Image: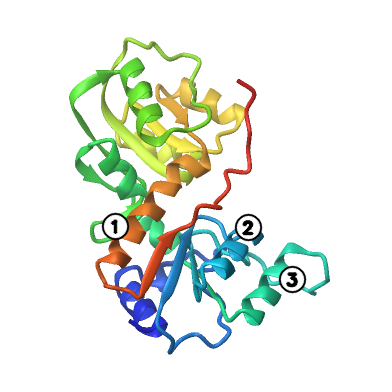
């Protein structure tokens, strides 16, 4: 399958027109690879380490969840990571494509994969954006779990370096309705309250957002950005494999960017 055909297939599934106004979905760098056979390295975040991996593996497309470019750069300077990424992309004929907020909303995107991993039933979006799609997912845990068992399940399934949860939490509380949203989802707390979820799994939560969740009766669980979104990248590889591409692989150089003392 040609790169152009792969992108056409993907955009029919996760339309880049769904991208938020602040976001930058779609081609980040297209150095002339559209009509070559797709050799795809899928990653969460396009970094120099991922680019070096793509070069070593002779990939011609880095398919990333996070955009390489969020804001239009005003200049390019030697020694800057963005400049080096663009230089290497053209030097080695490697395209960089991003599927971000469009991939968050779509069926089997970041939120759906989390819901499936945690075996949620009767799932619906936290914030619907169009028929059956939207940001986050909320669903039923059947049979219900104590919060302690739910946290253990999240740790087992997602393997985050650290789990943080609300200070008011009773570990023996029964959780039967859970909301999930991969990545930075603490801004959706008010929407989660309206779903009657008892707990909310997301990432990048701030001090006062834990306070807000406590005051509004929701157990807020922060498993980290990487742990909550990386599984969707793995699922994307599986979907691409079903298309019989010449070659596709999940990056082994994706980074969490954080370390914790144990």
174 or 155, which is in the foreground? 155
Q: Residue sitting at 56 percent across and 53 percent down?
A: 253
Q: How far apart are marks 1 and 3 (CA)?
A: 36 Å
Name the residue beneath numbered marker 3: 83
Instruction: Give the residue displayed 45% in from the left and 60% down from the top.
Output: 101
Q: Quadrant of residue 1?
A: bottom left
**Which residue shows up at 39% across the image and 77% down it?**
7
Q: Mark 1 points at which residue?
A: 133
Residue 106, can we see it?
no
Residue at the spot 31% in from the left edge and 48% down from the top edge = 113
Task: Give the residue number, with chain letter if any, for mark 2.
Answer: 49
Residue 80 image-quadrant placement: bottom right
Does dot 2 land on a helix, a strand or a loop? helix
Q: Where is residue 52 in the image (x, y as percent from the top left)?
A: 62, 64
| Vertical position of residue 39 compared to residue 206: above or below | below
Q: Where is residue 153 in the image (x, y as percent from the top left)?
A: 33, 26
């Amino acid at each position: 399958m040609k790169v152009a055909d792969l992108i056409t297939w993907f955009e029919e599934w996760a339309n880049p027109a769904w991208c938020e106004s602040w976001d930058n979905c779609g081609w980040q760098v297209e150095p002339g690879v559209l009509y070559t056979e797709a050799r795809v390295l899928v990653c969460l975040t396009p970094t120099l380490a991922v680019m070096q991996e793509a070069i070593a593996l002779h990939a011609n497309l880095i398919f990333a969840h996070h955009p390489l470019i969020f804001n239009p750069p005003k200049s390019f300077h030697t020694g800057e990571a963005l400049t080096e990424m663009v230089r290497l992309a053209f030097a080695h004929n490697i395209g960089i494509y991003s599927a971000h907020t469009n991939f968050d909303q779509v069926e089997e995107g970041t939120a759906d994969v989390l819901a499936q991993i945690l075996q949620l039933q009767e799932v619906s979006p936290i914030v619907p954006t169009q028929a059956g799609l939207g940001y986050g997912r909320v669903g039923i845990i059947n049979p219900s779990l104590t919060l302690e068992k739910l946290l253990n399940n999240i740790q087992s399934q997602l393997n985050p370096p650290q789990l943080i949860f609300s200070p008011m939490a009773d570990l023996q509380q029964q959780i039967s309705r859970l909301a999930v949203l991969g990545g930075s989802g603490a801004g959706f707390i008010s929407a989660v309250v309206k779903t009657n979820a008892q707990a909310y799994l997301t990432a990048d939560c701030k001090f006062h957002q834990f306070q807000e969740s406590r005051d509004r009766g929701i157990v807020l669980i922060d498993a980290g950005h990487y742990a909550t979104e990386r599984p969707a990248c793995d699922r994307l590889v599986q979907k691409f494999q079903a298309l019989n591409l010449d070659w596709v692989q999940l990056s082994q150089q994706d980074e969490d960017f954080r370390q914790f003392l144990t």
